[in-house]
Image (cartoon, helix red, strand yellow):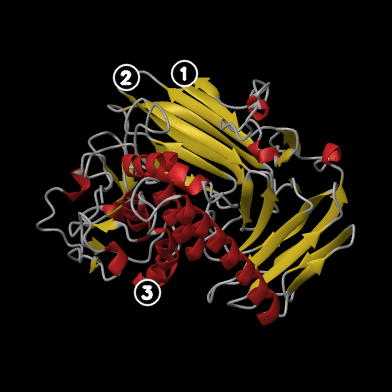
């Protein structure tokens, strides 16, 4: 990977400076030839030094990672050359996938290299969701599998077959566009064109018609589609709740059963204390079968989001909401009332964290009988993330489930292979802000602001596209603010 990054960097410099001394067409051709030689040597070494891979010449067949379906070994490099008689081309279907992720697959990966007249096209896969069918444009395809020295998975199994160029196809549940590109159902009507012809975003008005919408009454009801029957796959439901000024909204869940996950990233309900998903704080994200607590907004608006992927579906949820006058509202004896009318648990009072929107729970705490707050901040020791606008972080990292700085350093080391990219500095600030979030001595850990992610995406997306990487971060999940009390600007 590093050789490819470095090689393309040198090639790019020569193309831009053709008339510079020592960088004429001869050097360009030598550079290109050198890259091809390195690739050929890499394949030869992989075939010789590893116990996996090989040359596949039958019209159809299968191959898999070592030990599959058991865990694959660490530090593996496997290479298969699939060669079918022209004019046939190769079609590959990866039927199962369990490879350490996430995208852009910098740790472990399976990579398909398709050699065309326009050059090589690299496509990488990792994670736990099998990718769509790959219709290549070549009769010779290289497939490589790489694992690093840490986390491993069950690996993959794949099938290939020779097809004629005019017979490209996709699996029954997949969507075809661009005369042969296959997409998983979750990528269709997701708001982001994945096809050059944009047919995946056509005729999408029906997709989310059964859920979400505006709710303006003093009380109301909302539920996942089909509840109490299993909700459909690939759902994005957004309810916008609004009540009269001088009132807040209390949301109570009556039933709740979503796909169980360690981190709520597949199916979940997310509640925002605002008029939209990007305008205020998140009151919580919930999944599994544990009922969320009653949630109360700080003002007359609340936004509820329900997301379901293409995998496991459960019975979903239903919930009721009602408007409560700030003047009439009372909290139970075991709760503390914010000036906004929001009720909080008594143990959150004077605990060093601002739980009320205006910080009222941390005012006048000098004579508090609660133990003084002790900062859990620690100095950033990871070399890659030193020199940011802050030098304190805190662990464990609850957003990414990282135990300590040593584990964060191991994960961040994989990103250093991108150091040759011109956009590495904004990318460094983003990943450091995520992996080693800012910690305030007064209490609290801050995610990076959305603008940090958007800036890195704007500067890096095109560069990552050169290596067939898609942008791996969802910037919309980060706080849309410039307030240093709400998010960090590394």
In the image, 19: left or right of 360?
A: right
Mark 3 vs mark 1, CA separation in Å: 49 Å
Give the number of the mark in front: 2 or 3: 3
* The quarter of the displayed image where residue 370 is located: bottom left
Front-lying residue, 225 or 474: 474
Residue 341 bears which disc, if any?
none
Front-lying residue, 38 or 141: 38
Q: Is residue 408 visible?
A: yes
Residue 245 bears which disc, if any?
2
- For disc 3, the marked residue is 406
User: What residue lies at 72% left-to-right and 64% top-to-bottom?
Assistant: 156
Pinpoint residue 302: horizontal percent, then vertical percent.
42, 30
Front-lying residue, 100 or 392: 100
Q: Is residue 259 visible?
A: no
Give the number of the mark in front: 3 or 1: 3
Front-lying residue, 86 or 333: 86
Q: Residues within 10 Å of mark 1 (few under 14, many from 20)?
A: some
Q: Pointers 2 and 1 in contact (CB under 8 A)?
A: no
Mark closer to the chain start, 2 or 1: 1
Mark 2 vs mark 1, CA separation in Å: 12 Å
Pinpoint residue 141: horizontal percent, then vertical percent.
73, 57
Mark closer to the chain start, 2 or 3: 2
Q: Residues within 10 Å of mark 2 (few under 14, many from 20)?
A: few
Q: Residues within 10 Å of mark 3 (few under 14, many from 20)?
A: few
- For disc 1, the marked residue is 216
Q: Is residue 355 above or below residue 232?
A: below
User: What residue lies at 39% left-to-right and 39% top-to-bottom?
Assistant: 458
Pinpoint residue 407: horizontal percent, then vertical percent.
41, 71
Q: Is residue 396 above or below residue 175?
A: below
Q: Dot 3 lies on which element?
A: helix
User: What residue lies at 56% left-to-right and 45% top-to-bottom?
Assistant: 268
């Amino acid at each position: 990977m590093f050789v490819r990054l470095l090689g393309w960097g040198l090639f790019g410099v020569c193309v831009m400076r053709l008339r510079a001394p020592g960088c004429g067409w001869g050097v360009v051709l030598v550079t290109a030839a050198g890259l091809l030689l390195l690739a050929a040597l890499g394949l030869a070494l992989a075939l010789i030094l590893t116990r996996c891979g090989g040359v596949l010449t039958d019209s159809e067949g299968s191959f898999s990672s070592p030990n599959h379906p058991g865990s694959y070994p660490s530090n593996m490099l496997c290479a298969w050359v699939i060669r079918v008689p022209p004019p046939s081309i190769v079609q590959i279907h990866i039927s199962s996938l369990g490879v350490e992720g996430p995208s852009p697959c910098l740790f472990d990966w399976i990579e398909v290299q398709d050699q065309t007249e326009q050059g090589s096209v690299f496509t990488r896969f990792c994670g736990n969701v099998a990718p769509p069918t790959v219709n290549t444009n070549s009769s010779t395809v290289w497939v490589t599998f790489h694992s690093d020295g840490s986390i491993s998975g069950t690996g993959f199994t794949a099938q290939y077959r020779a097809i004629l160029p005019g017979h490209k196809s996709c699996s029954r549940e997949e969507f075809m566009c661009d005369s042969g590109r296959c997409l998983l159902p979750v990528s269709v009507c997701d708001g982001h064109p994945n096809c050059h012809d944009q047919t995946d975003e056509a005729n999408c008005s029906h997709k989310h018609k059964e859920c979400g919408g505006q709710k303006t009454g003093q009380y109301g009801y909302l539920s996942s589609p089909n509840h109490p029957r299993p909700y459909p796959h690939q759902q994005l439901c957004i309810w916008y709740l609004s009540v009269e000024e001088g009132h807040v909204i209390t949301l109570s869940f009556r039933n709740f059963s979503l796909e169980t996950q360690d981190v709520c990233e597949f199916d979940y309900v997310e509640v925002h204390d605002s008029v939209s998903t990007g305008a205020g704080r998140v009151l919580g994200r919930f999944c599994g079968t544990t009922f969320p607590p009653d949630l109360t907004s700080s003002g007359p608006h609340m936004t509820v989001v329900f997301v379901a992927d293409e995998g496991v579906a459960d019975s979903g949820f239903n919930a009721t909401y009602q408007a409560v006058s700030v003047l009439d509202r009372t909290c139970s004896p075991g709760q503390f009332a914010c000036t906004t009318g929001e009720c909080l648990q008594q143990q959150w009072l004077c605990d060093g964290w601002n739980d009320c929107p205006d910080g009222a729970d941390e005012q006048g705490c000098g004579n508090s009988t609660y133990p003084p707050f002790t900062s859990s901040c620690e100095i950033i020791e990871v070399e890659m993330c030193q020199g940011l606008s802050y030098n304190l972080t805190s662990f464990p990292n609850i957003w990414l489930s990282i135990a300590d700085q040593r584990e964060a350093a191991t994960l961040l080391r994989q990103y250093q292979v991108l150091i040759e990219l011109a956009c590495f500095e904004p990318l460094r600030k983003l990943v450091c802000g995520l992996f080693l979030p800012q910690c305030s001595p007064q209490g609290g850990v801050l995610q990076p602001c959305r603008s940090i992610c958007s800036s890195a995406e704007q500067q890096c997306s095109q560069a990552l596209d050169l290596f067939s990487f898609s942008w791996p971060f969802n910037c919309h999940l980060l706080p849309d603010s410039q307030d240093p009390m709400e998010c960090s600007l590394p």
